[in-house]
Each structure stands twice: as structure tokens, then as C-alpha cells.
Amino acid sequence: MRNSLALALTALTLVASAPATPAAAQTATVELRILAINDFHGYLRPSLGGIKIADPNDNTKKVLVPAGGAEHMATLVKELSQGHKNTIFVAAGDLIGASPLLSAMFHDEPTIESLSMMGLALASVGNHEFDEGKEEIKRMQNGGCHPVDKCQGPHPFLGAKFHYLAASTVETASGKTIFPPYEIREFDGIPVAFIGLTLKGTAGIISPVS
């Protein structure tokens, strides 16, 4: 579903444990910081006037606060990562689609490039990732020029440096997921699995031909 802006970057610190073995009396642990976003929707520039939130002093009222923009988010990601060796930046979908003109005019290629430059590692596919169809979201991952509008920039679109995951999005013809269902990353030798899930109702709110 569309949000007018999504720059609520959540920093979650977990303690990951390695499975105990007969040879180890204690279970090893490491601290893992997960920086997570969702519903970015191509808002490369801050939203004009800011966004409305509940007034901290009176929850019956709303106040406008400055928010948004890729530059601000990139700075926040960098700041939250500093001093935390085991940090990963991930996303829960709707990074593209329902986007402002700056991103939509170029089929959201600038947003993919921007998030790649920020160091986004993994992202699940949301319903808006399918706004232009299944093949287009594959192009977002793998790169290449748009089939109709061709290449609009100084070089061909290279695709995302981060990996899309789609454990619950299966192609009917092949019976396989359109992207890998999960990815395992290691932090100080401890494996952590990230699973990409799409909302159950997605099939009912996108074009059937997608």
C-alpha cells in the first residue's frame, strides 16, 4: 500500500548465537545491528512541507516535521552504522512504484541506484514492486534498458547491487520463486538467514498479467 513518505529507519540490535556443539561448553554470541526501511516509494527528495505526525505534546493534534530524501537517509544509515561492525541495511518492500516524477519518469532506476549507493544489502518485494509487471522488477534486479523507453541515461541501467528476496512469490509456470527465497549472511562466523516475504493479499491488488 502506498505511503506518502517512508523514511522511518529502524535500528534493531540483536544478539545472534551460534549453535552449541559438544566441543563447546558455551554458545558464542555476536551483536548484530539491522537497519530496516520500507515504503520508500522513490522519494529521492524530501516531501514538500514535511510529513504529519502526532503532536508529542498533544496526541489529538498533528504537526508537520521535515522528513524525507535520499541524502538524509544515506546520512542516517552511515551514522547508525558507525561503531557497529556487524551492521546490515535491509528493506521490507515498496521501495519503488507510486513514485514522484523524479523517479517514476525514469522507471524508478534512480531509486534503485540511490539505494545501492547507500549500501542496501537485501530487500523483499512488496506489491508496488509489481506496478510495471514481473519482468520489470526482474530488470530492476538484473539491469538493462527499458523495453519501450530504452536507455534514458548516459549509460545502460546496471540493476540493483542489493539482492531482492521473494520466498512467497512463485511463478505459476515454473513453480519457482521469482527471486531467491532467502539469503544467509555471516557475522563473525555466525550465519543469519534473511527471508523475503510478500503480503498475502498482493495477488489481489496488482494486475493479473504481472
Image (tube, rainbow, N blue to C red):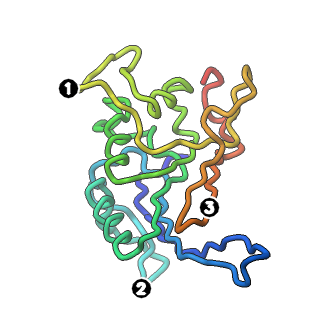
Position of 13 compared to 5: left or right?
A: right
The residue indicated by pointer 1 is 154
Q: Which mark is residue 191?
A: 3
Residue 129 place in picture, x, y as percent: 52, 37
Cα separation between marks 2 and 3: 44 Å
**N-term-proximal mark, 2 vs 1:** 2
> Circle 3: is it few (<14), some (14-19), or many (20+) Cα within 10 Å?
some
> Which quadrant of the view contains residue 48?
bottom left
Q: Which mark is residue 57?
A: 2
Cα separation between marks 2 and 1: 49 Å
Q: Residue at x 36, y 62 (%)?
A: 51
Give above or below for 69 relative to 150.
below
Residue 74 place in picture, x, y as percent: 31, 59
Q: Which mark is residue 42?
A: none
Residue nearer the viewer, 165 or 29: 29
Q: Residue at x 62, y 20 (%)?
A: 209
Mark 1 in CB contact with mark 3 (< 8 angstroms): no
